[in-house]
Amino acid sequence: MAGSLRIEPLASSEIDSMYEKCVQILVDHGVKVEHETALKTLGAAGALVDAETHMVRFSRETIEWALAQVPKEFVYKGGDEKHDLLLPHPDRSFHTSTCIQSMLYHDPATGGFADVTHDSYTEWCRLIERLGNVDICAIQTPMDVPAETADVHALNIQLQNTSKPLAILAYCLESVPYLFELLLARAGSTESLRDRPLAAIHPTALSPLVFKEMDLETIILACKYGVPIAPASLVMSGGTGPITIAGTAVLVATEIVAMIVMAQLISPGLPAVPCVYNYGLDMSTGNALMTSPENLLAQAVGSQFVKEAFGLPVWTSSMGGDSYVSDGQMVAGKNLQSAMCAMAGTDINYGAGRLGGSNLASPVQLLIDDRMVANVKRVIAGVEVNEDTLALDAILAAGSGGHYLRQRHTLNHCRDAVRPDLFVAEPLDTWQEKGSKDLYARAVDLYEEMRLTLAPLELPDDVTREMDAIVKRADEHLVP
């Protein structure tokens, strides 16, 4: 049946057991909250707060009440309606997000790595605006601006160069208010921002079970302005979390639920998209593994568990890779991981453009991933079975030894197949005549062609001046 291609790593009884473990941790142990105002607010709202240890516990009733407040579906809005995303995905497919916080780009001209700059990140955002299968632009880190305000500069670049929904996060406590000031300036008013938030913002856990000042400030201001949160657990299996897949999923979900509960106690009804962003620790090298078999399973398990246990859309780090270049290992890992997580129920696949590690990206890989997404979406869509697709009349008309090339049925469906331009096979002599180029070389050619026509958004001058002024003020206040 169309739209029904699914995998279920967990049985329903296993999901129930894992859910109870999450509740038990939050009820009996709690989480550490490093934010004085948040501690007072949460205590006043009914959480059990230990002022000395900063530990916060929640009753089962509070947890279940909070989860019931979160919208089970909402529209993730960008700068204009044409890019708005319905969550959960209406076709049981997925949306695609780029990778976050990258500091280095793979340079196709030299084959080496170069710092992300203001100009290269500007190009990246404009490229995203043009790609049909990349839906969300995640914040990155220009390295030629002050480190203290890199996130403020980056958000300003995003807001002026793409109208797609944004994924943002703060890099330090002091910059959090400036991020919301930029969103307000772009939206025009508090009411307009609440109606069209432009972004989802990531508070993250400091695994295991600690929440920093910066992330609580993020939650508090998101609640104030109605900006959806995308709470992310960053568990490293075997390092900052259990080495087992099931244990990792329990800790990931517990940290996510803790952030959701805190947000709902402050602002009931605030939209939230849980983010399953865990990785595996390679015990022989100390590296973080993204596409090891164990982490592939962990991501899929986390996606299914969070989606089914809490009834919320899920955002999964499922397009990463362990290779540092756009090679066969990279493409194979991304294909398998994104397909597995999508079939396990994720609504947003994260990591388009990502190379190995947590801070490497490539605009050429971004183009490859854009085309790869089309393939994955087609596969997980499954097969439509009806009188037309069963093709009985066509089979009988061709009979024994006939063909289907001139049949109306073939003509009606000959354009149904997905044919991403970078992946389409050609006759050998045609491929040789074009230079015998592999996938990466073809993607480089497309990148060089596209970058010549990229342009900023057409925004009112007073809006861009105000946003630039906010960035300047952040530099003046936060940069020594």
Image: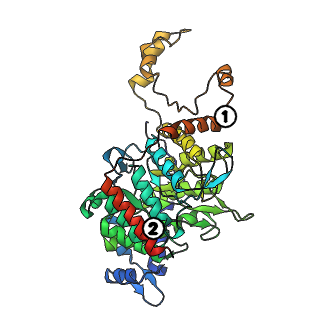
Q: How many marks?
A: 2
Residue 203, label in figure: 2
Looking at numbered disc 1 in the image, what kind of residue is underneath it?
A: Asp
Q: Nearer the viewer, residue 294 or 338?
A: 338
Q: Nearer the viewer, residue 67 or 478?
A: 478
User: Which residue bears the numbered disc 1?
Assistant: 438
Locate the N terminus by quadrant.
top left
Q: Secondary structure at mark 1?
A: loop
Q: x, y percentage for residue 83?
A: 36, 46
**What is the distance, in whole Å, between disc 2 and disc 1 at their CAs?**
40 Å
Looking at numbered disc 2 in the image, what kind of residue is underneath it?
A: Pro
**Counting residues from the N terminus, which is met first, the one under dot 2 or under dot 1?**
2
Q: x, y percentage for residue 32?
A: 48, 80
Mark 1 neighbour density, 10 Å: few (under 14) some (14–19) many (20 or more): few
Q: x, y percentage for residue 431?
A: 65, 24
**Residue at 68 percent of width and 46 percent of height:** 110
Q: Is residue 16 visible?
A: no
Q: Nearer the viewer, residue 264 or 398?
A: 264
In the displayed orientation, state which residue is furthest to the right.
284
Q: Is residue 94 left or right of residue 366?
A: left
Q: Quadrant of residue 51?
A: bottom left
Q: Is residue 98 left or right of residue 193?
A: right
Q: Nearer the viewer, mark 2 or mark 1?
A: 1
In the displayed orientation, state which residue is furthest to the left.
191
**Residue at 43 percent of width and 25 percent of height:** 389
Q: Is residue 62 left or right of residue 138?
A: left
Q: Quadrant of residue 49?
A: bottom left
